[in-house]
Amino acid sequence: MKKNHVTLTIGAILVIMFGFMLLSYQVRHTEVAIRTTFGNPVINAETGKADIGPGFRFRFPWPINEVYKFDNRIQNSEWTFETTSTTEGKPILVKVFATWRISNALQFFQKFSGDLSLANKTLESTVRSAQNSVIGKYTFEQIVNTDADLIKLSEIEDKMKEEVSGDTSTYGIEIKMVGIKRLGLPSAVTTAVFERMKAERQARITKIEAEGEREAKMLRAEADLKANEILSKAEATAKVLRGEAEAASAQYFKEFEKNPELANFLFNLNALEGSLKENATLILDPNTPPFNLLTQPNKASKE
Amino acid sequence: MQEYNSKKLGFINGIALLGITIGTLVLALKSESNVGLASLVLLGIGTLISLFSFVHAHLMDRERQEALEMQALDQSRDNDESLFSGAAEDAYPALNARRQFEKWIVPGFSLLLLVAQAVGIWLVLGKLNQWTSPNPAQALIPILFNSLFVVILFLMGKYSAGLARMDGQELLRPGASYMLLGSVLGTAIVLSETASYFGYPLWDKWITWLVFIIIITSAVENVVTLVLEIYRPKGDKTKARLLYDSRLIGLLGQPGGLISTAAHALDYQFGFKVSETWFYRYLEQKLALILGLQFVVLFFSSSFVVIQANEEALLERFGKNNRISGPGFLLKWPWPIDKIYRYKTDEIQSFTLGVIDKKEGQQQEGTKVILWTTQHNHGGPDQDPEQNFNMIVASNNADAQSAAESVPVNLLTVSIPIQYRINDLNEWVTNNANSGSLLQKLAMREVTQYLIGVDMDELMGPGRTKAQKTLQDRLQKRALEHKLGAKIEFVGLQDIHPPVGKNEQSKETGGVAESYEKVIVAQLNAETNRLAALMYDASKVPLAEASAAESIAQAKSDSTNKVAIAKAEAKRFSNQIAAFKSAPSVYKTRMKLESFKEATKGSRKYILSDPANRDVINLELQDQLRQDLLNVTVDQEN
């Protein structure tokens, strides 16, 4: 009897718990829910909406009541990196993302059966359409430019958001943002840009090398000029000094005028002495003094 | 007669299981049901066991008939006990056949089952790893047929299981257990197909996991049974349990028999009636209470939570955001009233923009050198370098902008690590479904928008630090705008350089990054050239100054000499005049010869002895040969 009592108690607790679970539900603070009675959505008389906020609530068990819960937080979605063109026909790769949230749970359930991935797929076409139509109205320079005032990316994003919001107004979702995540260039253009970048670098290389050469040459030329100037000045000074020495020494030349014959004789001797130095080879007549001593010793002694 | 009927029933069971296994296979392939395919492993094993137990039953039947025949023979020989009472074993071929069968074939069959279970585990695991959702369009017919299979298997299994409880009918039990399990599996297939039909394909995956666990558990049980059989005490009076009769499968087919199955297992294993001990009986009586108490303890244990030092916890009460708790002990209402969600808020989290992010655990080699000019990846080592993004950067190049048809842009490979942490858990959890993913998108957007407005040379040069700061500020601003609850700790710009791709790199000109390096080389060459010129300049002028000074000094010296010599010569001349006047001829000759001697001291002299015959007298009157010429050394090799 005691065993039955315990078993019955535990059984009762379990039944209560399962019954409680069947007759109640919780909506998390990150969720929104809708409840249907035999398939008809239960509309709140005050708000006119079927949305049920977070909290604990009672329900009838299936199949009388069914509760559908959805994530009420902001979702973010991104799609393919695709080519579009600017107003002047320049191709550009764009990757767009959007953030959105469920604004009307019943509409969302009716349009997408509550399936977030289906909503995502549906959004893709509207966002891509908006992306192509909006970017097609702007020039490339309004998308990429070093002048910040000319860039219109924020404007493009706002217009895309407007278009997407308009297209999805009955889907039960609210578009919070449409943003350009990434920009790129098609493969052929990328290759051309690479070539241009290389050419630009090559031009810079040539310029740098030429400028280097010019600067080096200028420095050398300036150095040569300065050196020449210094040497020329020194040469001039030397010449002046030598001239002055000539002038100073000339006063002593008068002394030679006293006996020009002797002076000339001595000058000749001096010149001869100077010219015969450094291993000169002489071919002499035997009559040349003092070698005449070798052939005419007596005559030589008389002389 | 009864034995004959049970043997026949065993055979019918085997054939029925075989038919249902084939039917399930066809239906599972048709609807692409993973649960159906996984169930085939157990159904197939059940078919094998049913047919094997039929053979076993046949042998036992033969043994029984042989015993009857021997008994009849004994009676016909007028009870001559001495003749056959001690008959040799050879006299009972059916008995021997059965014993040999149980000794060798049954364990061998158990091993075969183990192999089948292992293959089944491998196949189902492969299916789970590459799980694909079933085809809901083809679900209806499998639902109908599997429902039929459930009924057939349940009725036949229940009937066979009832018969198997009778003495001598144990061989029906293994097949009956698998038939009842087959009915459970059929129900699972119907459930998963129905869920798939109504748009819940994931049920198929979870139920397949359950079936997978059952296969693993039965395989483990098979191994354990085989091992325990070796150590089980074997008495002649103890009837051996069938090795291929799984208690687990019996339990799954008939969960009501849990306690009796446990008791039988203990009795069988220990060789005495464990189930009759006081402890076992106490456990049996209080089992419900113990389980109940455990349930209560388990339920209330969810009221005690310890939040670790690196965590914060979000407490939800009936789904509503109640509060955020920091580290420490936390008392809460039990589940499902209060629920706790833990987050490591202080932990630095990071992602890298510009590349496919590297996988966790794949660290870049510390010794690897990354060059702009060689193919490399900023992500993991297994990733394709071509995955590095080429980001558009504005060009300030005047030539490029002036050309109307050209695209005034440059391309840049970037890899920007961004580190952040959660600084407001409430915002992080509440506002966005995937805050981390949104932060990455916003970061990429900011980087894209920043790059398109900045000059590449500026960015890679002096503007790098400013860019880093600007990007961090902008991203933090966006995080605040979108209420992400994240604090941006770091934005790195260390990996930002001209692109290097396989496609654009040519042997002649190299890649874009290489051309950037060539600019640096050219700058260095120009600088080298300039420095050489400076060096020339530095030496040229002082040398010229030195030469000038030398030249002037020489001139001064020459001048001084010139004047002094002139003065001295004038003075000497005045003295010479006196000498000349006293002996003009002698003086001149003396001077002449002295000068000649002095002047020709080092000269080689040839004197013509007779001008007519041109004889030459060679007088070696010169000085000894110059000493320096004697010092000339001649290379021996020459």
Image: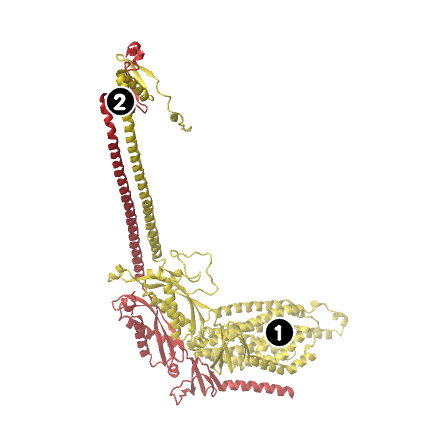
Chain colours: A red, B yellow
Where disc 2 sits, the SS reads: helix
Seen as rendered, the residue at the extreme bottom is A45
Tell me the residue that label 2 is attached to.
Answer: A266
Q: Quadrant of residue B620?
A: top left
Instruction: Point out residue A5 in the picture as x, y percentages from the top left corner.
Output: 62, 88
Res. B631 visible in picture: yes
Instruction: Point out residue A187 in the picture as x, y percentages from the top left corner.
Output: 32, 62
Check disc 1: other Cα within 10 Å, few if <14, some if 14-19, many if 20+.
many
Tell me: A12 left or right of A75: right
Tell me: B232 left or right of B190: right
Given contact means CB atoms under 8 Å apart, are the residues at marks 1 and 2 in contact? no
Tell me: B83 left or right of A118: right
Tell me the residue that label 1 is attached to.
Answer: B57
Where disc 1 sits, the SS reads: helix
Instruction: Point out residue A54 in the picture as x, y percentages from the top left corner.
Output: 45, 83
| Closer to us: B544 or A209 | B544
What chain letter is assigned to the residue under label 1? B
Mark 2 residue type: Leu
| Closer to us: B532 or A105 | B532
The numbered dot on residue B528 is none
Quarter of the picture holding the C terminus of chain A: top left
Instruction: Point out residue B460 in the picture as x, y percentages from the top left corner.
Output: 35, 60
Mark 1 residue type: Ala
Residue drawn 39% across and 68% down?
B472
Labels 1 and 2 within one chain: no
Check disc 2: other Cα within 10 Å, few if <14, some if 14-19, many if 20+.
some
| Closer to us: A1 or B442 | B442
Res. B9 visible in picture: no
